[in-house]
Amino acid sequence: MFRFIHAADPHLDSPLLGLESHQGAPVEVLRGATRRAFVNLVQLAIDEHIDFVVIAGDIYDGDWKDYSTALFFRRQMVRLRDNGIPVYLIVGNHDAASVISKKLSLPENVHVFSTRTTESKEVGKHPVVIHGRGFPNRAVPENLAKEYPVAVTGKFNLGLLHTSLTGRPGHDTYAPCSTADLREKGYGYWALGHIHQPEVISEDPWIVFAGNCQGRHAREAGPRGCRLVTVNDSLLVENAEWHTLDVVRWAVLDVDFSGIENESDALLRVSEALKKAVTAAEGRLVAARIVVVGTTSLHGSLHRDGQRWRAELLASAQDQGAEAVWIERIKIATAPVYDAAQLGGRDALTKIVLENLNEAHDKQTTLPSEIEEMLGVLPAEVRREAEAEWGEDQRRDVLSDVRAIILDALGTKGGQAR
């Protein structure tokens, strides 16, 4: 029997763009999270006396500004070397051979697979052959799996591949292939990287995305970690046990205000959602995005008194304990309890106002010319961040606020016009 760890996509020192614009953001905690999660990975391997570790690409997030990121990674590899644990890794799209311009030697326990051709490597002391190939360039449109050799008889064959498979939302399509392409090789385990959401694609054979070690934003919510795989003497996978590594837990909390008519009940519901997220995070900092949904008579107030509501929600986060929750964003996506069509039939002027509001909401998909002109004089890097802050979702949010405030001012209550 032997055991190995399958990890992927550490994205060490991944930049968190625009974080400084979030007042009260735990900047140092968030910026150091990828390193701390990787330290957890190494410590797990040492504590569990793992036989070897495989990493399926994107160790780095891009070219190094200096050598500090690479030296950190190397230091962790030395820790594994000193505990007799070899490491086998490939590079992915973020740390492809064409991306990392600087070089730093790695300790002898680390094997980096070729980026020019598929390579097979035997693991000393164990009947294991690892097959892998890294990315030569940031974009790899071809099916690399086709080049992998068939399984070596009498060995446990492990495929190490950075791929999108047939595609996943939110990820570029790189090294595309099908599960049939992987199955036909006859391997016992495919250790995949690139897709950050952990997923077991198949157990016969095992085809697994380990996911990234640490979530980096709200689109990467939920636990992040690695797989600890046990292979028995018959060279069959007994299990691929999940182990959590993250130190910050991103969470998107949909809080339903349906039927709520007073603020105290609304805030209680927010507090309950936050408490549940804190409990699930098991001592980790929760980086939360709160999305308020549902049909509620508080709809107008939520938009009209946005600053006060935000302060109340931040206060609810404080009540969960020091350093327990940081609220990254609050999004109001509620609906009014009144019937807009009925309101529009009240009089001609109200109908015209409603029609103009709806038309503006539907058509506002480009930046206003005044904003474009102002952005044009900014440096490119600053402009990109500003444009991100004025993205389509944000523009629609502003228009939703305006619409809700105007509708509330028209005098609606309980579904009837006053």
Image: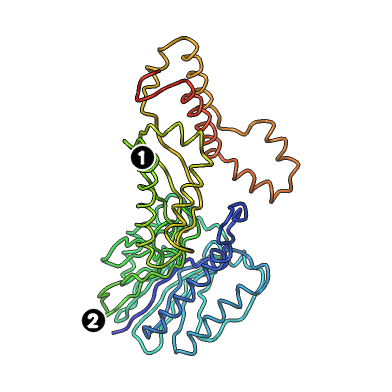
Quarter where residue 386 is shown: top right
Residue kind at label 1, given as amino acid type: Phe
Q: Is residue 46 above or below residue 168?
A: below
Task: Please rate how many residues cluster around mark 1, counting C-alpha atoms within 10 Å: few if below 14, some from 14 to 19, many from 20.
Answer: many
Viewer-proximal residue, 151 or 283? 283
* Disc 2 element: loop
Q: Is residue 277 visible?
A: yes
Residue at image coords 45%, 56%: 220
Query: Front-most of 206 and 62?
Result: 62
Q: Quadrant of the C terminus?
A: top left
Q: In the image, is residue 305 above or below residue 3? A: above
Place of residue 166 in the rendered image (x, y in percent of width and height, measured from the top left): 40, 53
- Neighbours of disc 2 within 10 Å: few (<14), some (14-19), many (20+): few
* Nearest the eye: 411 or 11: 411
Mark 2 to mark 1 CA distance (whole Å): 55 Å
Residue 372 is left or right of residue 95, and the answer is right
Q: Which amino acid is tagged 2?
A: Ser
**How many numbered callouts?**
2
Pointer 2: what residue? 234
Residue at image point 53% right, 86% down: 108
Q: Earlier in the sequence, mark 2 or mark 1?
A: 2
Q: Residue at x 37, y 86 (%)?
A: 49
* Dot in front, 2 or 1: 1
Residue 95 seen in this snapshot: no
Residue 162 image offset from top left, x and y in percent = 46, 64
Proximity of marks 2 and 1: CB atoms separated by less than 8 Å? no
On the rendered image, what quadrant is the N terminus found in? bottom left
Left/right of residue 160 with respect to residue 240 in the rendered view: right
Q: Is residue 243 left or right of residue 86?
A: left
User: Where's residue 95, x and y in %?
Assistant: 57, 66
Q: Looking at the rendered structure, which numbered label has been put on residue 257? A: 1
Place residue 143 in its image quadrant: bottom left
